[in-house]
Amino acid sequence: MKCFVCGGVEVKYRFPCCRERYCSLPCYRRHAAGQCPARPERESAKRPRKEEPEEEDLISEVRLCALRGHVGVRSALQNEAFQDALITLDEAHDRRQTLEKLLEKDKFFLKFVGDLMEAIDYFPRDRDLKPM
């Protein structure tokens, strides 16, 4: 398989909009900056993110694989009520406030965050987000 953007032969990822393959963050950014014909109208109407993460802020491939294989993460993502909560979070005007409300009131969401952090071996010192 070849990279959809640059034509390189070592592809590792797929675009979520069109499922075409790409090889690197620069290719992803170039594709994301353009208008993908497979991207639905609703997605293009979303407000842009405030800032793009730097490469060092992105999760490593090893940790991403750990997330994919984590039983708690996989089972949570199959739950329709949880999927609705994620959509609500994504579409919220103030995502930070909505996330904080979910963490305070939704035990299932709190458990999911704990599973995510466990899967990537991230344990903050200042906040205890263990499931109740």
Image: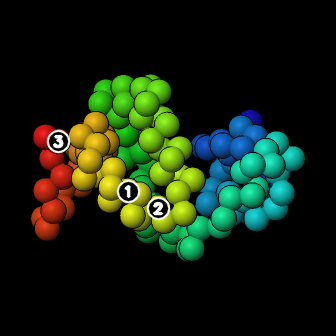
Q: Which residue is mark 3?
A: 131
User: Which quadrant holds the C terminus?
Assistant: top left
Q: Which mark is residue 73?
A: none
Q: Residue at x 39, y 64 (%)?
A: 97
Disc 3 + disc 2, Cβ < 8 Å = no
Foreground disc of the pair 3, 1:
1
Q: Which residue is mark 2?
A: 95
Give above or below for 126 relative to 64.
Answer: below
* Front disc: 3 or 2: 2
> Residue at point 28% right, 43% down?
106
Do we see residue 64 in this rendering?
yes
Left or right: 113, with 78 as reference point: left
Of residues 118 and 90, the one drawn nearer to the viewer in this rendering: 90
User: What residue is drawn where x is 60% and y is 43%?
Assistant: 12
Density class for disc 3 (Cα within 10 Å; few <14, some 14-19, many ≥20) is: few
User: In the image, 123: left or right of 67?
Assistant: left
103 or 33: nearer the viewer: 103
Residue linked to disc 1: 99
Tag 3–tag 1 contact (CB < 8 Å): no
Q: Which residue is found at the position 87% from the left and 47% from the top?
A: 37
Q: Earlier in the sequence, mark 3 or mark 2?
A: 2
> Residue 109: x and y, percent?
31, 42
Distance between mark 3 and mark 1 Cα atoms: 16 Å
Element at label 2: helix
Q: Quadrant of residue 71?
A: top left
Q: Residue furthest right?
A: 37
Q: Position of residue 60 (x, y in %)?
A: 41, 54
Disc 1 and disc 2 in contact, CB within 8 angstroms: yes
The percent coordinates of residue 124 (x first, y second) are 18, 62
Q: Nearer the viewer, residue 2 or 57?
A: 57
